Structures are given as C-alpha cells and as structure tokens.
C-alpha cells in the first residue's frame, strides 16, 4: 500500500547548499516564522526515506540527526506510513478520554512489556517529551505527597515552564523566560571529561555528593523524584560512569523517592538496547519516552509502576490530543519495525563501526578531546588540543563544512563544543562511512 518511492541511499549534490530554490524559500521562512526558531541546516526538505533527505533543489543529504533522534526506524519507514494511511482513513480523533480506541491500549500494552522492570506497569500517552516529563512529575508528587524534584547538571527535559526549570542550561533554553517553578534541586553530574576530582572513583564520589545533598540540604523525606537521563542528550551525550545509575536507583528506593528515567532521546533501540537503563539492569519506577516512539509523529508516554500510575484520581490526567490514533498507529508500525529489522542489534553493530571511525579521527586530530556514547548515540567533544577547554569555533566550522558537502550533523553540549551523531538505525554502512569521510575532510580543512 505504500505510495512513496524510495530514494536511493546515496549522497548527491546538484547545487550549493542552500540551492536557489531553498534560498528563495528561506527568505519566506524568515518573513513568516518566529525569529525564535533555530535551524540546523539551511535547506527546505521535499521528501525523505531511510537516511536520505531530499531538498527542493534535488540535493540528497545524509541524515545523521534523525530529526533529533526521532526517526530511528528511518525516514518514511514503510510500516509506519502504511499504518498511518490506514488509520487516517478510519478516523483521526475522538479523544481517548471521550471515546477510547484500540491502538492507544495496544501501544500501552507494548510499553508496559518492553520498558525495564519486571513489576506490573501502566502507561499514559501524551503529545511531546516535555508533556510526558510534566506528567511524570505530577504523578510522582501526587503519589508521594512530597514536593521536591532532584535533577542534574547538564540535563535537558524540555521547554515548557516546569521542564525549563528542570533543564540545566540557561542559553538558549531559559534565558529571559522565567520565573521558573519552585522545588527543583540541581545536583552534580559525574561528567568524567570535566570531572575535577579523582576519575578512578568518580562514580562513588559523585554518589556521595548527590546523596549527601539530598539528605543534608533538601531532606530525603521531601523528595518526590530523582529525574535523570540515562545518557544525557542535549547536555552533550554525557554517559554516567558505571555504578552511578544503579547506586542512585538504590538510594531512591531506600528513601521512598521515585526514580524516573527520561529515556526520551535514548529510547527505542538507539543505544543498542531498547532502553539505555538496561545496560546496568536499572529498573526505574517511571520511564518517560517520546522522540523515537512513533517514527516522527507526535507521541510521548509515561510508563510506571501500576500502583503509582493508578494513584491519581479519575480525570486528574489527560489532554485533548494525547495518544492520538494516527500517532498510535505510527508507534505500532515503529515498534514492529524495530523488532522485524533487529534494530537493537543493528544499533550495536553500526555503533561499533561509528565509534571506530571517530576514534580513528581522534588519533589524527587532537582537537577531538573525547569520543563517547553508546550504540548509535555517539558524540565527539572538541577542545583546544591537549586540554579540556571547549573549542566552539572548530565545532562551528566542522558542522558548516559537513553541511556544504551534504551531511547533516547536530551539535550539543553545555560548553557548545560537541558534535553528536544520531543517524537512523536503518542507515547503510556505506552511507555512514561516506559521512565519516566527509567528517575527516572537515577536520582536515581546519
Ligand atoms: C527532546 C527531549 C525532551 C523534550 O521532548 P519534546 O518532545 O521536545 O518536548 C525531554 N527530554 C529529553 C532527554 C529530550 O531529549
């Protein structure tokens, strides 16, 4: 039933980036859309399939961003497209809390089964990652009857008022947008590349600092939830040292605090596990998902312990569009694709190839201070050679060069010096290596 033609999986430039048609259209963009919106690559997209974006000038661009870790199953994945078309023809909306439908229930059943934790789980569907984070905090406060939420340095949880408060970085996310919600407490993150203490004992040392702050400064009995990304996304793909997440989760359960994993960027096969928490066997009380859940349609979820998710009074949760049937159809197509195409395994296999390429570049170019990540969630942090001082200028030049050659890469990092790689997991090895050769040339051109 799929009506789209698949694009050949190869990079092809027929004009400069941006080409004449994109240039003209971008003038209209500037005229019509809010100046508060950013833009990673200056082209207008006409069509996309798997790991190739086609712009209106006919350029084929390699997608190493997946629309910020969303199209893990590839752009316009056929199982997603087919199910969406079928659902649009059946009905587009009833509101699940007005007249329920089956695919919302099916998505929740699958999430309850595949998220970490062997206990009874239940789910709630909403529209965006930020909305899911907001709901997780609402539920955690309701269940525990406690006000405080503990979050980490370098964290990112969204752009709504509560999630801005939970997010660490001021520019561009928070500056001028306050006042922010109260009862949010920020604690240090063991970011090993910038850790000033002993790196051999970073995990225990960071745990001691965090639990000490919770006990002495906040009072553990006041804390509803500890909220953490199992690998930080916007903060620069900061991977916590081994033992940190299990230690935190253990401390939380000993103090009646809910441990909430924000798996919005790490979820759905991205890190070589279905969810990043699986790496160390951590079983969060609640898992927040979005981005990769529905192949590009707006959907997000909170999945948690049955007794926690059921504690809220009837109609205390909801929203008009949450768990829209078309988005749920897309989620079912996405989950089917991950399983049918073994994308968890594929993220591992391609992740190794990507890591090896990046480590090779690090040997050649000492401005690459660190290569880090897991699976197909990898990043490089650019520095002044031999130090850990950020090199933002080099990052900007490399990104610009990659764009000019038809490779879309995203940036990240508190210090604005990280290039992150989040290709669709279905990307071919050839295309990934072609992108890496462009990256090599980009560093060579500095
Ligand atoms: C993107 C992101 C969010 C916010 O999701 P939106 O859908 O943009 O609201 C929350 N947490 C993490 C870790 C994210 O990467």
Image: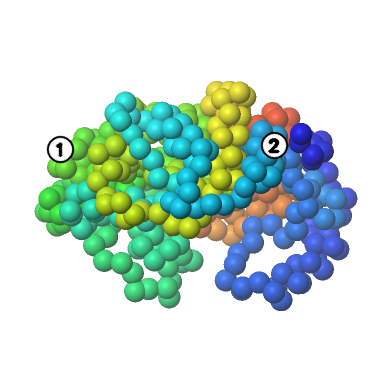
Left or right of 308? Residue 346 is: right
| Residue 121 in view here | yes
Residue 155 or residue 295, whichever sits in front: 295
Of residues 233 and 307, which is closer to you in this image?
307
Residue 272 position (above or below residue 147): above
To which residue does mark 2 refer?
82
Disc 1 residue: CB within 8 Å of ligand 1: no
* Residue 238 placement (x, y as % from top left): 42, 44
Q: Quadrant of the N terminus?
A: top right
Q: Is residue 338 above or below residue 51?
A: above
Q: CA distance from mark 2 to mark 1?
A: 47 Å
Say which of 346 and 316 sits in front: 316
Q: Residue at x 27, y 50 (%)?
A: 312
Q: Residue at x 68, y 49 (%)?
A: 408
Mark 1, residue position: 254
Mark 2 vs 1: CB contact within 8 A: no
């Amino acid at each position: 039933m799929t009506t789209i033609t698949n694009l050949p999986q190869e990079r092809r430039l027929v004009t400069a980036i941006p080409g004449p048609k994109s240039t003209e259209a971008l003038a209209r963009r500037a005229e019509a859309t809010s100046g508060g919106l950013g833009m990673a690559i200056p082209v207008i997209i006409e069509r996309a399939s798997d790991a190739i974006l086609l712009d209106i000038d006919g350029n084929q661009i390699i997608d190493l961003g997946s629309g910020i870790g969303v199209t893990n199953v590839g752009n316009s994945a056929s199982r997603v497209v087919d199910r969406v078309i079928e659902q649009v023809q059946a009905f587009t909306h009833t509101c699940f809390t007005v007249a329920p439908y089956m695919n919302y229930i099916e998505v929740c059943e699958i999430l309850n089964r595949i998220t970490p934790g062997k206990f009874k789980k239940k789910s709630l569907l909403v529209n965006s990652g930020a909305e899911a984070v907001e709901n997780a905090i609402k539920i955690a406060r309701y269940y525990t009857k406690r006000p405080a939420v503990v979050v980490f340095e370098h964290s990112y949880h969204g752009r709504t008022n509560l999630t801005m408060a939970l997010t660490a970085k001021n520019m561009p996310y928070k500056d001028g947008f306050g006042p922010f919600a109260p009862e949010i407490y920020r604690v240090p993150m063991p970011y090993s590349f910038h850790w000033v203490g002993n790196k051999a004992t970073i995990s225990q040392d960071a745990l001691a600092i965090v639990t000490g702050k919770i006990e002495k400064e906040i009072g553990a009995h006041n804390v509803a939830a500890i909220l953490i990304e199992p690998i930080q996304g916007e903060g620069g793909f900061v991977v916590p040292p081994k033992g940190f997440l299990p230690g935190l989760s253990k401390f939380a359960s000993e103090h009646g605090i809910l441990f909430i994993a924000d798996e919005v960027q790490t979820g759905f096969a991205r890190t070589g596990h279905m969810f990043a928490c699986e790496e160390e066997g951590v079983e969060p009380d609640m898992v927040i998902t979005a981005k990769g859940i529905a192949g590009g349609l707006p959907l997000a979820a909170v999945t948690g312990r049955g007794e926690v998710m059921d504690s809220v009074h009837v109609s205390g949760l909801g929203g008009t569009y949450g768990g829209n049937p078309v988005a749920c159809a897309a989620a079912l197509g996405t989950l089917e694709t991950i399983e049918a195409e073994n994308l968890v395994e594929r993220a591992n296999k391609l992740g190794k190839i990507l890591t090896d390429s990046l480590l090779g570049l690090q040997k050649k170019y000492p401005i690459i201070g660190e290569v880090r990540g897991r699976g197909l969630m990898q990043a490089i942090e650019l520095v002044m050679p031999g130090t850990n001082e950020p090199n933002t200028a080099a990052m900007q030049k490399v990104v610009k060069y990659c764009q000019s050659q038809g490779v879309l890469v995203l940036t990240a990092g508190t210090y604005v010096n990280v290039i992150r790689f989040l290709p669709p997991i279905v990307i071919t090895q050839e295309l990934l290596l072609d992108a890496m050769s462009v990256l090599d040339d980009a560093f060579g051109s500095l």
